[in-house]
Image (cartoon, rainbow, N blue to C red):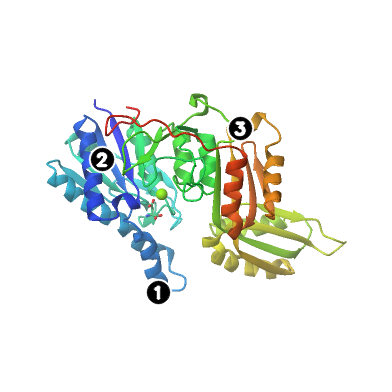
Amino acid sequence: MQDTIVMKFGGTSVADAERIKRAARRIVAKRERGFRVVAVLSARGKATDELIAMAEEVSPAPDPREMDMLLSTGERISCALCAMAINDLGHQAVSLTGSQAGIVTDTAHTKARILDVRADRIHAALDEDKIVLVAGFQGVSTAKDVTTLGRGGSDTTAVALAAALGAAECEIYTDVAGVFSADPRIVADARKLPVVSFEEMLEMSASGAGVLQLRSVEYARNHGVRIHCRSSMEDGPGTVIVAEQDTMERPLVTAITHSTGESKITLLGVPDRPGIAARIFGALADANVNVDMIIQNEAASEGAGADMSFTVTRDDLRVARLTLEPVVDELGIGGIKEDEKMGKVSVVGAGMRSHPGVAAKVFDVLGDAGINIEMISTSPIKISCVIRAERVDDAVRGLHDAFALSGKDTVLAEDPFAGPR
Ligand code: ASP
Ligand code: MG
């Protein structure tokens, strides 16, 4: 049987009619090279942001179920339009919603997780020689409601389909040429990385690299899906995400990632007894708020209560505040403080595992730049520092420079649609 390829196109790659037609041509070219093709599309351009803004115009706290009904439309528009364009190129395309494509999720509206992919309808369409377009970022819950998979969720749709269909590769077409050693908008000489390991990519996605949604990388690692991140505007290979033993080079530091969308919450005078942290973070988890870094300081004196600081994304701040208010009262916590405009800079590299001294150098660089570090967290292959959002760009440039991460880009292939295959 022919190999199946999943091709995912991000929002900028389908932003206008010209780009939709370009994506259609790319999809058709893949089909004409003998592959069975399933394409996953994102909503056009800023469509999802616009839908969110529309919801906020009519309601201060939109109902999550209705939010999903609304948000899922963006991706459906892209797919229907692209199917029309493909049909005009003399091929047969069929567009499917997430639900029609058999993407079954849990019931966590706006952040649902994929539980199962029942791909029989896709298989049937492929067997009929059709090109299948699947609306990204959405599914149907076990309660039969439309769900969405969280911002950037089309990546996860694509990887989940690649896993379910046994696809040879999951290609992620985006507006950048691959995964870079830092955001090229901040660091002009950032280097395109030819290969990144799943472990490094997990840390990078978790710490702000927008190219791939974190869950898509997790899913790919767990199911052994090979991801190829590449440009939809130009040809040539991008970045391949593979298991660690397959990566060729292993520098000390691979990339600097960042985010400017963090917020810090501090609880003052938290009673110092067992079970308190569990109550606080349990409540946040139940409200689906992801907590990143947590710091707790000892009570200054007997009975004074501890201070506890943690970060959440700015998008989650409102829900976090609403969730914590009753908990603060219930536990007799002294007070709650918020710093809305926080950022985070992270240094990621598998080579760190066996080389000490990276953290010291990171702190040196930030200190020399006069950047105050408010929180620190580490993993075997990552060091993250929470700093004020307005110093993030300086921190990224300083660290990229200090670890000498710029270098020559990889050579472009001749074949206009060449990838690794
Ligand atoms: N359109 C959705 C978003 O902007 C999903 C995606 O593009 O992956 O988050
Ligand atoms: Mg994305």
Q: Circle 1 — which element?
A: helix
Q: CA distance from mark 3 to mark 2?
A: 43 Å
- Label 1: few (<14), some or many (≥20) within 10 Å? few
Q: Which mark is residue 57?
A: 1
> Is 278 situated above or below 159?
below
For the C terminus, which image quadrant?
top left
| Amino acid identity at mark 2 | Ile
* Image spot of residue 9 (x, y percent): 32, 46
| Amino acid identity at mark 3 | Leu
- Does the beta carbon at disc 1 come under 8 Å from ligand 1? no
* Image spot of residue 329 (x, y percent): 69, 70
Q: Which residue is mark 3?
A: 252
312 relative to 305 in the view: left or right = left
Q: Circle 3 — which element?
A: loop
Q: Is residue 291 visible?
A: no
Q: Nearer the viewer, mark 3 or mark 1?
A: 3
Q: Nearer the viewer, mark 1 or mark 2?
A: 1
Q: Is residue 343 visible?
A: yes
Q: Which residue is mark 2?
A: 122
- Does the beta carbon at disc 3 come under 8 Å from ligand 2? no
